[in-house]
Amino acid sequence: MQNKDINIQNKTKHEIDDYFIIENEIPNSGNIKLRIIHKTGGKHFAEHSKVQVLNTNFESIGTESINKNNINLIINTIRSKGITEGLFVIKDKDGNYEKKISILNKKISPNIVRHSLTNSESSFTATGEKLNGHWPIFEKYKDTGYGSIIRATMTLHQVCSSRCQFCSTIGRNKKDSTTLEESKNFINKLYFDQGEFNKKNFPEYNEKYKKLTGSDIKLRGLILSGGGQPNLWPHFTEFIEWLSNKDISLGLITNGFPKKIDEKIYQYFDWIRISITPENASSFYPEGKFNLQYVPKNIIDDPSISLGLSYVYGPWTNDDILKRIHKASVEWKCEYVRVLTDCNLSRNYQILSHRDLSNKLYSLGYIDDKGNPNTKIFHQLKYHGTKQEANEIWDTGQCFLQTFNTFWDTTGHEENGYSYCYPCDSVTVLAEGEQEQDYNAKNIFSERKFNYHKWGTVKNTEVEKLFTEKVKAYFDPRDNCSACLFQRNNRVAKDLINSTNFQGIKLDKKIKHVNFP
């Protein structure tokens, strides 16, 4: 890969791996804003004006503006550590920049993080506990080798109004979008065709599932995502109205609410999660404040909709925004607020960043000394797995998420006329590497785009293969996904498959949104 600097119209442009990084001087400040653009040319970008400053124990001591004094250090760090970890700088007790930090040469345990797994985290994220509520599909897989796709996510398109620094799909193409007809066909196969297939071919397991859940084995939960704002998709309202006539639990993940959308359409969602972006990343925030954005009143006032907030902690964070998140959660009658760290970080950075986040939440009184929430805010402890864990879980080379879940992303749709499904939505952030062995060794950075050659399973036009054919490995997760963020879910699914007493499996009745395991 090329790594060179070019001067264009008095702006320095760096070509580093898969990215162009352009230095823009902020007038009358001496500071610099870095614009990071993926070489795929999708016209999406992220802008950074600050870096996180850490001490030699990898504890945050604030942020620092990017300026003429530190720009060379930062660019060099980006060259060696990528566009995520390159935005961290480390200083010793005298305020001098450190190029190495011994703590990162070790295997860091997540036990250093102040955290407790709560019912909110189990209900509103995928931790594996909800899988107990679907045990007959795992018995079916154990006995027959056939999967049951009960949960799906669709991106719909790749358009977003934000330019988040931590964007997991910065390499996407805005023109990659699905049509309304294609979307309906995808759902019809997973809902109607899969239901009929299981009633005809696997009546024993279908009846067990129906007795347990009241439904045939078919699509139960659907999440609409998509470049940040699925409700910017031109067919959004018509598609939701069509879905509303089906027994499918609906979830929505969005950065905002375009006013041209009739807000009545949101009544059909079981839950809606608002992603709070760094405030300089979303131009639609009035006065640059997320809490001044438009949120439809019927979402706030409808008790049947679980409204939640999600926030990624990073160099853009300060006490003020965390306090306003807490305040907004009360004013908007939110059921929860999920906070987590940047998933593009490699494992050691991620766990240490989680420790920093938990200490911050504790200092503000939002969690107690054990990590239990004192407010609607809960800390999701989500971090990359290790190669050793990958080899243990996937000893046969089969991802277990693939037996019940699929994620359809539209990457490549414009060029090919179709796009691919994936076992999960987090393959784009897999930062691989053995960092604990050698901090200076070059990691395999997160791709920040969907690579169907590496992680794809079936085309969206052939999604029926996921339930009409026996489950097979489309790639070896030990090679492609050793840093998986869902190793816990994989382990739970594997344990269920290997169960010797399916009838004895019970679901914690306090857990909500069971159709989104």
Image (cartoon, rainbow, N blue to C red):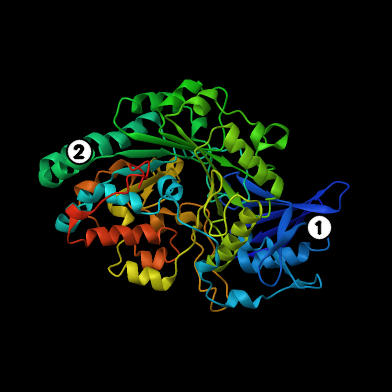
Image quadrant holding the N terminus, namely: bottom right
Q: Real-space Cα distance between discs 2 and 1? A: 60 Å
Percent x, y for residue 270? 40, 33
**Nearer the N terminus, badge 2 or badge 1?**
1
Residue at x 26%, y 36% (from the top left corner): 191
In this picture, is 414 found above or below 86?
Answer: above
Residue at x 71%, y 37% (from the top left corner): 288
Residue at x 61%, y 28% (from the top left corner): 294
Left or right position of 381 against 400: right
Residue at x 48%, y 57% (from the top left corner): 116
Front residue (pair 10, 58): 58
Residue on which the image places disc 2: 216
How busy is the neighbourhood of tag 2: few (under 14 within 10 Å), some, or many (20 plus)? many
Which label sits on residue 514? none
Residue on which the image places disc 1: 67
Instruction: Tell me the amino acid under the disc marked 2.
Output: Asp
